[in-house]
């Protein structure tokens, strides 16, 4: 009995160790590229040239033996996603447009150091003294709205890609890309939360 | 000159005129001297050190000049170093009294001078006078020319030890210097806290053996302050403080009021600027002998914006602060109240961009430190979200809540409103609020477009994490034309109605069990598994499944100005996802039903429209087509699986290099064949819109 037991034990172990865990890995590099495209759009740099638009669709009716109308419901389609991260959903586009519109008002506060980029992909009032008293509420409001949009953006990207659980990783990816792409003179938080100037 | 100390021990013989002097000096200096008084005219005493229990003086020199007049003598006392409790050591202290009179009747010293190098005195020298009436047991003292904290200080004091009074006036004080002077007695300020301003203080203190009454009036101008972060700051403020306190049997009664007549304050996230009338706050406080506040009645007035009154007293289990009482508030114009006080709290939420008007007032009662009840009354309130997501006007009524027992009934009424572009009409909502939430007191019906949403029950649970609620009801028919117009959809005709056995909302998600039935085009559509995510967020998302049964294609195509097709259509849209009310994903499939007896015809116009939607040139080139206005068909079928903006198309059945969208029947036979499996959704929509709004170019 014993040899049989030990053999079957080994077999079981082999069987178990042969079980494959399938992980869906977060496409970090693609996420960075996606983040860069959004950041460039929001902060006003020209994104890299888009692939040329697909040709205009064509459809035609041609008789074939019998009277046959052929309908080509055609393809200006498929800007095939080169990256694995899709940022084309209406939700993302809408949030992006909202952030872009707000950036015109926020930019001067980044430049003065009143507002800085946090290490978790959001923004924060860093030095309210740089802002006249009467405008501090406006800055507070802009920061709150920007953060609301940013959180919605990270969630929307995760959801658009079918992985709501990626939200945190997308936020972290953005955190480093916002800082990497910040203009000279802007303030950001380092890993330990200390403010530094670019 | 006071700083030069003389170490002289000098005794000059003089007539025996001032016998008490020696005793006096002995008392003053603590040194017993055996001086022949009859011979003294000028006395100079030098002492190395004098010490008391908590003070000491080094290098003390006292000079008495007895030759001034018969009634008085000149005193000059100096010390090289003096140590007093709570003060840093003083060097070179001096007091001069040019006419000191010490008699049986009392002591008088007029026009005296002092030199006290206290760090907070701008000038160590000042003047004073002193008089003591021994018979009456009264004293008078005055102090003038004191320069401190950048300003002038004058004071008078008088009375007896049983009843005395001190009046003080300080003008042109500079606050930072005053703060520095008072630093040992004030709580320390946070690092980086800065402030400035100029002020005047008038104070009166009265008492006997202990302090009995204090009254202070202070006016501060150009007051500015800021903490290190700038999140608590004020600028260009003018403030007046009136405070008085008097001792009673229990402790102290304090009455204090402050008025801000100019300037602005920012206390994150609120910014309050004085523009019209002053802001004021006033408190009457009773403090017990143990230093704890027994009761307080306070009033805050921001004229036209917010008024609040609170009355609190200490419950049996309270600590140093009162924990029972009430607070009432009124907002005479919610536009200002929202702008100043409410909106900053809502920044970054759906409620942060509202146009608000109306009035509100309310009251919160407090028991054992927590809210025991609350009421809120609204008067003709209008709210309009500037992003257009929701709005309501003519909102009024009262909400009552209490932690224990049954609260008074709550009721809200309104004239009209909208949620996104869904207009709703006047209604009345009767609610019952309790500790854990809110429920419907009676059935509620809401006119919605041209139908009515009837809620038979409704309950909100606020006890848990966030707000959760349940709603049960039904929807009487709403015309699809109104609904589709509201959402900018192509104009559908028909009616929407439904039974909503359960609508649950929690964490920004609304889940609708049951089904909405759309009677449309002589067929019906059933909308089920509805979920609405973040309805008030930046991008609302709607998910649903849709079953479609036996639509009359004749009605459908005529409704959309599409070429005429006769027949019926079954179908379904599974996993429909709308973001911001635009479809982003679905799996749709439409087919000619296999059963039923109906006429199947497709017009030449419809074929044309279909090809135009497909981006083709149509069949106009085929002249002989004009002979046939319509064609028979066997089946129409269309599938579109939308993901990532691309529709993966399918038809009735596969065809050579494509798929049949229309499979013809009989003669002449027309087949419509799609060749491309992948179609750009936006392009498809644009074409569909063009065809359905302008109508196709008709072949004659």
Image (cartoon, coloured by chain):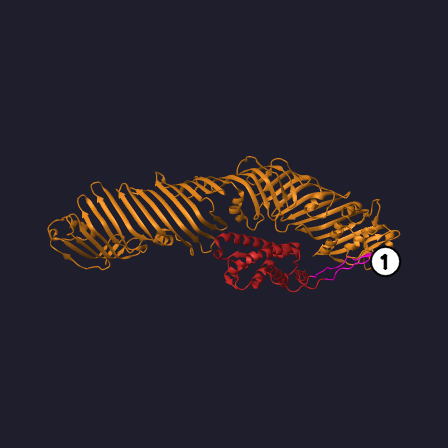
Chain colours: A red, B orange
Q: Quadrant of residue B515?
A: top right
Looking at the image, how many numbered discs can be counted on the residues? 1
Residue B289 visible at all: no
Query: Which SS does the magenta portion mostly show?
Result: loop
Per the image, is B164 magenta?
no
B269 relative position to B249: left or right? right
Is residue B680 positioned above or below B336 on the image?
below
Residue A55 part of the magenta-drawn span? yes
What residue would you read off at disc 1?
A63
Left or right: A185 as drawn, with respect to B459:
left
> Considering the numbered disc 1 on the image, is that residue within a helix, a strand or a loop?
loop
Tell me which residue sits at (76%, 52%) in the image.
B691
Residue B361: x and y in percent read 52, 39
Magenta stretch, residue numbers: A54-80
Name the residue rendered at 66%, 47% in the picture.
B531
Rendered-image quadrant of the N terminus of chain B: bottom left
């Amino acid at each position: 009995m014993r040899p049989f037991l030990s053999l079957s034990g080994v077999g079981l172990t082999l069987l178990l160790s042969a079980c494959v865990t399938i992980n869906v890995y977060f496409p970090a590099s693609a996420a960075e590229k996606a983040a860069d495209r959004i950041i460039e759009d929001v902060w006003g740099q020209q994104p890299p040239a888009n692939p040329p638009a697909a040709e205009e669709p064509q459809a035609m009716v041609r008789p074939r033996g019998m009277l046959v109308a052929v309908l080509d419901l055609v393809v200006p389609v498929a800007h095939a996603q080169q990256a694995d991260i899709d940022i084309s959903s209406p939700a993302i586009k809408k949030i992006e447009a909202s952030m872009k519109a707000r950036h015109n008002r926020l930019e001067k506060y980044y430049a003065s150091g009143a507002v800085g980029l946090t290490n978790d992909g959001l923004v924060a009032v860093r030095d309210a003294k740089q802002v006249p008293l009467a405008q501090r509420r406006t800055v507070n409001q802009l920061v709150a709205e920007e953060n609301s949009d940013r959180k919605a953006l990270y969630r929307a990207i995760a959801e658009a890609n079918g992985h709501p659980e990626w939200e945190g990783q997308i936020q972290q990816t953005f955190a480093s890309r916002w800082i990497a792409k910040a203009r000279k003179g802007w303030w950001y938080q380092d890993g330990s939360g200390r403010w530094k100037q670019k | 000159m006071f700083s030069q100390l003389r170490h002289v021990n000098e005794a000059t013989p003089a007539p025996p005129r001032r016998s008490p002097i020696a005793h006096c000096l002995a008392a003053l200096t603590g040194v017993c001297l055996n001086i022949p008084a009859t011979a003294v005219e000028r006395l100079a005493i030098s002492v190395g050190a004098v010490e008391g229990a908590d003070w000491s003086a080094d290098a003390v020199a006292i000079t008495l000049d007895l030759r001034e007049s018969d009634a008085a003598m000149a005193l000059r006392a100096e010390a090289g170093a003096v140590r007093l409790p709570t003060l840093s050591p003083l060097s070179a202290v001096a007091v001069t009294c040019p006419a000191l009179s010490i008699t049986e009747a009392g002591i008088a010293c007029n026009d005296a001078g002092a030199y006290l190098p206290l760090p907070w005195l701008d000038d160590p020298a000042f003047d004073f006078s002193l008089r003591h009436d021994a018979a009456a047991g009264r004293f008078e003292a005055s102090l003038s020319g004191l320069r401190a904290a950048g300003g002038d200080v004058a004071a008078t004091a008088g009375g007896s030890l049983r009843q005395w009074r001190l009046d003080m006036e300080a003008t042109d004080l500079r606050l930072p210097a005053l703060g520095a002077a008072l630093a040992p007695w004030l709580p320390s300020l946070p690092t980086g806290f800065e402030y400035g301003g100029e002020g005047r203080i008038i104070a009166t203190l009265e008492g006997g053996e202990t302090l009995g009454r204090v009254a202070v009036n202070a006016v501060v101008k150009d007051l500015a302050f800021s903490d290190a972060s700038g999140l608590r700051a004020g600028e260009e403020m003018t403030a007046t403080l009136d405070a008085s306190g008097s001792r009673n049997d229990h402790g102290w009664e304090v009455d204090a009021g402050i008025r801000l007549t100019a300037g602005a304050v920012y206390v994150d996230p609120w910014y309050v600027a004085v523009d019209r009338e002053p802001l004021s706050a006033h408190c009457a406080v009773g403090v017990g002998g143990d230093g704890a506040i027994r009761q307080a009645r306070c009033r805050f007035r921001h004229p036209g914006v917010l008024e609040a009154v609170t009355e609190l007293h200490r419950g049996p289990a309270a600590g140093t602060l009162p924990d029972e009482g009430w607070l009432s508030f009124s907002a005479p114009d919610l536009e200002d109240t929202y702008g100043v006080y409410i909106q900053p709290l809502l920044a970054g939420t759906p409620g942060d961009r509202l146009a608000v008007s109306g009035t509100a007032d309310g009251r919160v009662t407090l028991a054992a430190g927590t809210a025991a009840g609350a009421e809120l009354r609204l008067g003709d309130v209008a709210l309009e979200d500037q992003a257009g997501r929701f709005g309501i006007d003519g909102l009024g009524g009262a909400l009552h809540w209490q932690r224990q027992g049954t609260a008074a009934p709550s009721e809200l009424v309104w004239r009209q409103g909208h949620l996104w572009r869904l207009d709703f009409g006047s209604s009345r909502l009767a609610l019952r609020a309790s500790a854990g939430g809110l429920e419907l007191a009676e059935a509620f019906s809401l006119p919605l477009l041209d139908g009515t949403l009837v809620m038979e029950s409704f309950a909100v649970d606020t006890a848990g994490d966030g707000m959760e609620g349940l709603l049960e009801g039904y929807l009487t028919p709403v015309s699809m034309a109104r609904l589709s117009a509201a959402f900018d959809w192509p104009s559908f005709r028909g009616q929407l109605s439904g039974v909503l056995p359960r609508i649950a909302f929690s964490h920004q998600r609304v889940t609708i069990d049951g089904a909405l039935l759309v009677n449309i085009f002589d067929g019906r559509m059933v909308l089920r598994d509805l979920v609405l995510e973040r309805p008030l967020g930046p991008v609302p998302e709607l998910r649903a499944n849709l079953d479609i049964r036996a639509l009359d294609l004749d009605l459908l195509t005529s409704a959309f100005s599409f070429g005429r097709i006769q027949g019926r259509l079954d179908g379904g849209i599974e996993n429909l996802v709308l973001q911001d009310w635009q479809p982003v994903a679905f799996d749709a499939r439409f087919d000619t039903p296999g059963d039923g007896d109906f006429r199947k015809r497709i017009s030449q116009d419809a074929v044309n429209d279909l090809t135009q939607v497909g981006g083709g040139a149509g069949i106009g080139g085929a002249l002989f087509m004009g002979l046939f206005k319509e064609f028979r068909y066997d089946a129409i079928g269309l599938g579109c699986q939308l993901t990532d903006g691309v529709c993966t198309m399918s038809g009735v059945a596969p065809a050579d290099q494509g798929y049949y969208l229309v499979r013809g029947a009989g003669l002449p036979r027309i087949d419509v064949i799609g060749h491309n499996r992948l179609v750009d959704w936006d392009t498809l929509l644009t074409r569909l819109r063009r065809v359905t709004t302008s109508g196709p170019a008709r072949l004659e």
